[in-house]
Image (cartoon, helix red, strand yellow):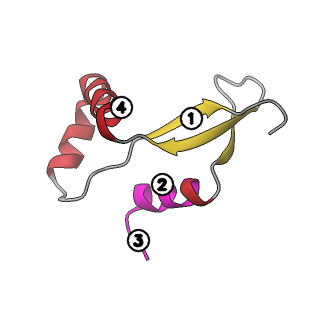
Amino acid sequence: MLSQPSMQFARRRRDDPHVEVAIGGGPRRPMTARVAEGDERTELWSKLTADHANYAGYQRKTDREIPVVVLDPAPSGA
């Protein structure tokens, strides 16, 4: 079993990508979670570390790649 919380979260989202998210106290909205890969992950990771330098520090402390989870609006009827 994976021991890192972010890796466990990523695995659960692959198994069941359906989530609900409330932003700023608003209503819950259905979303579909997925792990970004390739060029998309590279671009998002650059933006994340530009805004939150501590993430780059976390990455330097591990050999594994820290997953970037993307939330897309769920299709209607999901």
- Label 4 element class: helix
Residue 44 lies, in percent from the top left, at 34, 29
The amino acid type found where label 4 is placed reads Glu
Q: Quadrant of the N terminus?
A: bottom left
| Helix, strand or loop status at disc 2 | helix
Three-letter residue code for mark 1: Leu
Q: CA distance from mark 4 to mark 1?
A: 13 Å
Please state the horizontal and vertical placement of residue 11, each as a whole percent of the image: 50, 60
Query: Mark 4 to mark 3: distance in Å?
Result: 24 Å
Instruction: Magenta stretch: give its range.
Output: 1-13
Residue underneath mark 2: 10
- Front residue (pair 36, 5): 36
Q: Is residue 2 left or right of residue 48?
A: right
Of label 1 and label 2, which has the lower sequence position? 2
Q: Residue at (58%, 42%) from the top-left corner?
A: 33
- Single out the residue that lies furthest toward the left: 60
Left or right placement of residue 54 versus residue 76 in this view: left
- The residues tagged by marks 4 and 2 sit, at their Cα atoms, a distance apart of 16 Å
Residue sitting at the far right: 77
